[in-house]
Amino acid sequence: MIKAIVNISLKAGVLDSQGKAVHHALESLHFKDVRDVRVGKQIVLQLDCDDKKVALAEVTKMCEDLLANTVIEDYDIELV
Amino acid sequence: MTKVTILQFPGTNCEYDTQYAFERLGAKTEILWHKADKLPEDTSLLVIAGGFSYGDYLRSGAIARFSPVMKAVEIYAKAGGKVLGICNGFQVLTEARLLPGALKRNEHLHFLSKHHHLKVINNGNDFLKNLSVGDVVNIPIAHHDGNYFIDADGLKDLEDNNQILLRYTDADGNIQNPNGSVDSIAGICNKQKNIFGLMPHPERAMETILGSDDGVAMLQGFLKA
């Protein structure tokens, strides 16, 4: 079995309003050295598959088709 | 007679308002459950109504896009059939790539529910043909993810092909952007001008006693003479 961890975040250049709000909140808690905050989401998949190459191709297609909206989001895949 | 088919997904909640609006204008209507694999043959307008299909899980419209009925919608739209996506319907159409761009969380993260003024930008299409360019209408908005995003090249395409339908403004037609949308865009259409999407709810602006009947002239554009 392979575990795939997919991290999805807004593309660089696409304003991340939630990240900005969290940044402001951290500043008001006196964390003064935070330069930038990006909020994303993580999707963890358990795959009945033992071939990492196959798994990567499959999860990439999942990201392109459904898990991410590539108009505004980037994704990266980690296989464990 | 105009036949309006209105899609219903789990979580759709504007289908009956939409039905009321079009029947009031004299159209025949049918609400179609998302498991259908084809559209009624006499459909002259397909409406994807507002709401929260699939609870907005993953992204607004992302799951609904894969409902069985959407294959039929795609075939219908690509053959030139008229499609109108209102609010969540607009989100579904962008997720399905039937309209360009994407809808993000509102810039200030608030759910917005109020009347808002909109200015007509292009009227060379069925939806807005009863209005004039520059007209200001007052239409309710009710969304959390209405912040329209498109990249610079995409925006230029929209402008060059007269695809921008409406922009958010104040009562005098000056830009007033409630949600951070690129170029204050509230609604667009595709290049062929048969697929329309907007975040505001014209179907909720049918009676002056409820604040505005500016939606009448908009929806009437889809009715056969």
Image (cartoon, rainbow, N blue to C red):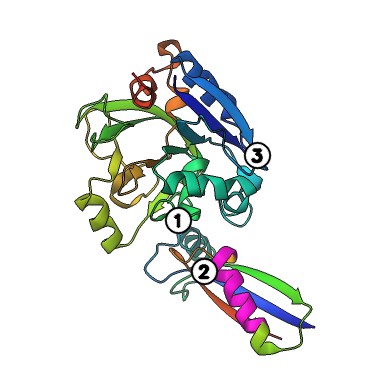
Residue sitting at x 47%, y 61%: A24
Label 1 vs label 2, nearer the camera: 1
Q: Which residue is mark 3?
A: B11
**Which residue corresponds to the image point at 66% horizontal and 77% vertical from the top-left?**
A5
- Amino acid at circle 3: Gly
Q: Amino acid at mark 2?
A: Ser
What label does residue B97 carry, if any? Answer: 1
Depicted B75 relative to depicted B165: above or below: below
Q: Residues within 10 Å of mark 3 (few under 14, many from 20)?
A: some
Find numbered disc 2 in the image and state the secondary structure of the residue it sits on.
Answer: strand
- Residues packed near mark 1 inside 10 Å, few (<14), some (14 to 19) or many (20 plus): some
| Quadrant containing the N terminus of chain A in the rendered view | bottom right
Q: Nearer the viewer, residue B102 or B47?
A: B47
B190, above or below B21, in the image: below
- Looking at the picture, does residue B196 appear above or below residue A25? above
Q: Is residue A43 left or right of residue B222?
A: right
Pointer 3 or 1: first along the chain: 3
Please name the residue shown 65% across and 47% down the image: B54
Q: On the image, numbered disc 2 is attached to which residue?
A: A9
Return the chain for callout 2: A
Instruction: Name the quadrant containing residue B132.
Output: top left
Q: Position of residue B108 (x, y in %)?
A: 44, 49
Across the whole image, how many numbered discs are drawn on residues?
A: 3
Question: B21 above or below B86?
Answer: above
- The magenta span reads A55-66
Check the image and name the residue furthest to the top.
Answer: B209
